[in-house]
Every structure is written in structure tokens, then in C-alpha cells.
Image (tube, coloured by chain):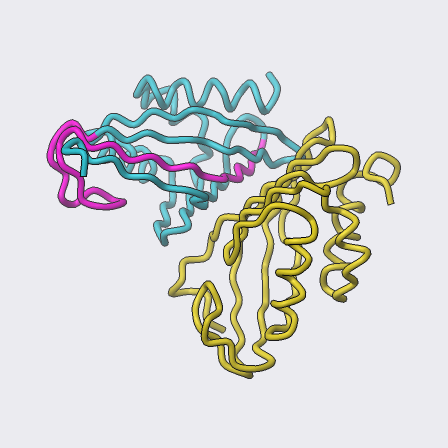
Chain colours: A yellow, B cyan
């Protein structure tokens, strides 16, 4: 799917849908080869590194992201999104970078994310936590 | 005026400590929510909050990027707080005179007409520089 052909928001929603169904080839296709990723749990460079990170995450957690707010730059070069993330622990992950998780734990948080885009791929993703830590527990 | 141009004028008013001009950018029932848990309702509460910040520090905001879509503007801003007095009760952390604190934030501004109705900010990166070099 092309951002230009489909419109930025549907293109982004398709990315989230692919992410939520753990369709690695589909959501990985949104990442530039040299993507710079500043997530809550990892700072990474490169598509392979980001996908390897999410492969690891998925062995411990079920992760679902919902789009709350969307702002697309008119020239298609950037997206700002408000995202609601739900994490469900599938097994214990005592060393999870944002804090230990046990099987069955559910965590929810709201983040603001900035996406830089070139040639229909994300070149940089940065996220900032909006919901304070004290308010994120389900 | 485009939402982006209006936002630049708003930040200019903020940096100039022009409270009267600043109030004009807010709807009467504007709501400001910061990711640290701070929540302010109404333009007077917001201006009072910024006034307190500016009594203790010189805060300058630089717009890194901003763009609007529909009735929301997204911005990445960089704030520098320079403590002009010892501020042990400063909103973010205790500061000594001369200390600097930098915040890089992602912010959503919902607007109706020419006024902001809801502002929500999350901190992406922060850096503290002590005047003592510590």
C-alpha cells in the first residue's frame, strides 16, 4: 500500500493492523532499512534490529495498539499519533526494559509517537509516554 | 492565518511573556494535560501556571516542527528553562540559580476557530545541566 495512493491515515492504519496481527513481513515493510527507532523499551537502528526486537517482545507479550488521534503532515513526510497500547504478559519477563511483567499481567498506556517518512517508509520513529506511570496499570 | 502560522505567533507571545496575547489563543474552557500528571482547566489556570514557571526560570520554547491536520496541530517543541533564582519547588525538579533544564516534547493542540481547546504534552527527552557542572 502506498501512502500517496491510499492517503496517509489509511496507510498508517494498515500498518497498525499489520502490527496487531503480528504480520512481520507486512509491518516490517513500513520500515526503512536504516530506520532509527526510539521506543519506550529500546533504542535501535535498522529494520532488522527493530523486527528482531519485536520478535523477542512477542515471545513474552501480546501487544495491541489502537489509534486515538492522528495528525498527518500535508506533504506526507510526518505523522504524529496518539496511541493506546495494551500489553498482556504471556509468560514472566523479569528483565523487560520498562519494568518486570508476569504472565497474565495487563498494562495499558498512552503514548505520543512521531514518524518521519520517506519513500513510503518510516525513517524514524520516536515515542513519548503520555499517561503517567501511576495511571497505566489496568 | 494557517494553524502553523498561528502556532508560531503563539509561541512568540509565550517567549515574550505576553500574557495578554497568550490568553487570546486559549478557549475559555481550554484544558491542558501534561504527561507528568499536571492538569489545568481554563485559560487563567494555564497562564497562572506559566507565570509561576517564569517567575523561577527563563523559559524559551523553540519549535522543532509543527503541522496541522483537521482541527489538531501536532508539534515537537524544545524548551529551555534557565533558573533565575533557586527554585527548590520547581515543577519538574529542584533547580539552583543558573541551572538549565531542557525538555523535548510532543504536543497535540486541538483547536476551534483560532483558539486552542485542548493541549496535551508528553516529554520525549529531558536533560539537566547544573550551573556547577555536576
Q: Position of residue A116 (x, y in %)?
A: 65, 36
Instruction: Name the residue: 70% across, 31% down.
Output: A77
Q: Position of residue B44 (x, y in %)?
A: 32, 36
- Foreground of the two, B53 or A114: A114
Q: Is residue B20 left or right of residue A6?
A: left
Q: Is residue B56 visible?
A: no
Which quadrant of the figure has residue B14?
Answer: top left
Vertical side of B110 occupied by B67: above or below:
above
- Foreground of the two, A101 or B8: A101
What quarter of the picture does the N terminus of chain A occupy? top right
* Extreme residue in the left direction: B86
Which quadrant of the figure has residue A2?
Answer: top right
Instruction: Name the residue: 36% across, 41% down.
Output: B126
Q: Give the magenta range.
A: B83-112
Q: Is residue A32 visible?
A: yes
Vertical side of A25 occupied by A78: above or below:
above
Q: Is B110 colored magenta in this rendering?
A: yes
Q: Is residue A37 left or right of residue A94?
A: right
Vertical side of A67 occupied by B110: above or below:
above
Instruction: Name the residue: 45% across, 44% down.
Output: B124
Q: Position of residue A113 (x, y in %)?
A: 58, 46
- Foreground of the two, A63 or A35: A35
Amino acid at each position: 500500500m502506498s501512502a500517496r495512493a491510499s492517503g496517509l491515515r489509511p496507510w498508517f492504519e494498515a500498518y497498525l493492523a499489520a502490527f496487531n496481527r503480528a504480520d512481520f513481513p507486512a509491518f516490517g515493510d513500513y520500515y526503512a532499512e536504516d530506520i532509527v527507532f526510539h521506543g519506550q523499551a529500546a533504542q535501535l537502528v535498522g529494520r532488522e534490529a527493530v523486527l528482531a526486537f519485536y520478535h523477542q517482545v512477542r515471545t513474552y507479550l501480546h501487544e495491541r495498539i489502537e489509534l486515538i488521534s492522528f495528525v498527518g503532515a500535508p506533504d506526507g513526510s510526518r505523522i504524529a499519533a496518539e496511541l493506546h497500547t495494551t500489553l498482556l504478559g504471556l509468560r514472566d519477563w523479569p528483565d523487560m526494559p520498562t519494568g518486570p511483567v508476569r504472565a497474565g499481567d495487563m498494562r495499558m498506556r498512552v503514548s505520543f509517537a512521531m514518524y518521519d517518512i520517506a519513500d513510503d517508509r518510516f525513517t524514524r520513529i520516536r515515542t513519548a509516554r503520555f499517561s503517567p506511570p501511576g495511571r497505566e496499570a489496568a | 492565518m494557517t494553524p502553523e502560522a498561528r502556532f508560531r505567533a503563539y509561541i512568540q507571545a509565550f517567549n515574550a511573556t505576553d500574557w495578554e496575547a497568550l490568553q487570546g489563543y486559549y478557549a475559555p474552557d481550554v484544558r491542558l494535560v501534561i504527561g507528568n500528571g499536571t492538569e489545568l482547566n481554563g485559560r487563567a489556570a494555564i497562564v497562572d501556571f506559566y507565570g509561576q514557571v517564569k517567575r523561577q526560570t527563563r523559559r524559551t520554547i523553540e519549535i522543532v516542527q509543527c503541522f496541522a491536520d483537521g482541527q489538531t496541530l501536532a508539534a515537537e517543541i524544545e524548551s529551555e528553562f534557565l533558573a533565575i533564582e533557586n527554585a527548590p519547588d520547581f515543577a519538574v525538579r529542584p533547580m539552583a540559580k543558573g541551572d538549565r533544564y531542557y525538555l523535548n516534547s510532543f504536543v497535540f493542540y486541538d483547536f476551534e476557530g483560532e483558539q486552542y481547546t485542548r493541549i496535551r504534552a508528553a516529554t520525549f527527552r529531558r536533560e539537566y545541566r547544573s550551573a556547577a557542572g555536576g
